[in-house]
Image (cartoon, grey):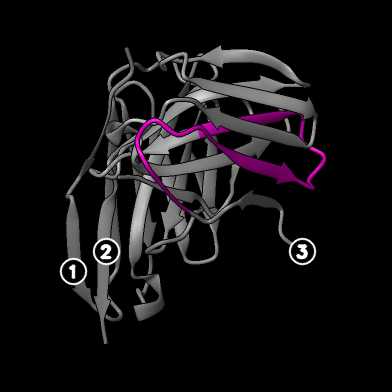
Amino acid sequence: KQEVTQIPAALSVPEGENLVLNCSFTDSAIYNLQWFRQDPGKGLTSLLLIQSSQREQTSGRLNASLDKSSGRSTLYIAASQPGDSATYLCAADSWGKFQFGAGTQVVVTP
Amino acid sequence: DTAVSQTPKYLVTQMGNDKSIKCEQNLGHDTMYWYKQDSKKFLKIMFSYNNKELIINETVPNRFSPKSPDKAHLNLHINSLELGDSAVYFCASSRETVTDTQYFGPGTRLTVL
């Protein structure tokens, strides 16, 4: 059974610093891995999706890497801004089911 | 234009009641999902439908019954509500079942008193 863990559970950084969010999964047989952002009281917004054959995906200030052999994915957010404050979740797609981590709550202070 | 919408946004009800949550997507996607986010913020898949056919049914009490009248709609009906059903329920959709980005609705916060 796939288990997804996100460390740290919470992170606070000053504006301008780079953010590094970690996601680990136990079953490397995944179809893809997706990163989401959740704002308080709102739904999830998809940020990046990495197919199992890919090593990374980039969108603007966001870069996500995937290492299936070690069961890890990392989300990098460059030059963080207060608007990046949110909870970030990763989800591993195994056998058609997305298994979510508990998320990392990020606060970027001005 | 809202891609995935859910109604209602908030639902407060008494134990034992029956309630429904509606979901609609205007993305032309083939697959729709229901997720439950508990108080610890864990998101767990409940159901998945592809072209109106049930393809994933996780270990969910049979008090929960999804209904897909067409590809664009996936409703969730819950019978005999219990306190433990209190959670936020998210609907999502994707173009295909395993390879595509999932798009989520805003969630429905269900509170059972």
Q: Residue at x 36, y 53 (%)?
A: A88
User: Are the residues flagged by discs 2 and 1 in contact, CB closer than 8 Å?
Assistant: yes
Mark 3 vs mark 1, foreground winner is 3
Say which residue label 3 marks: B1
* Callout count: 3
Front in this rendered view, residue B15 or A56: B15
Gap in Å between the C-alphas at discs 3 and 1?
34 Å
Instruction: Identify the mark nearer the N-term, 2 or 1.
Output: 1
* Amino acid at dot 2: Val
Residue range in magenta is B11-34
The residue marked by circle 2 belongs to what chain? A
The residue marked by circle 1 belongs to what chain? A
User: Are the residues flagged by discs 3 and 2 in contact, CB closer than 8 Å?
Assistant: no
Q: Is mark 3 on a helix, strand or loop?
A: loop
Q: In which quarter of the image is residue B102?
A: top right
* Above or below for B4 versus B50: below
Q: In which quarter of the image is the N terminus of chain A?
A: top left
* Above or below for A109 versus A2: below
Residue B43 x %, y %: 37, 37
Say which residue label 2 marks: A106
Q: Callout 2: 10 Å neighbours few (<14), some, many (20+)?
A: many
**Mark number for residue A12?**
1
* Amino acid at dot 3: Asp
Gap in Å between the C-alphas at discs 2 and 1?
6 Å
Q: Is mark 1 on a helix, strand or loop?
A: strand
**Seen in the image, is B77 located left or right of residue A1?**
right
* Above or below for B43 versus B9: above
Q: Is residue B101 in view from this perspective?
A: no
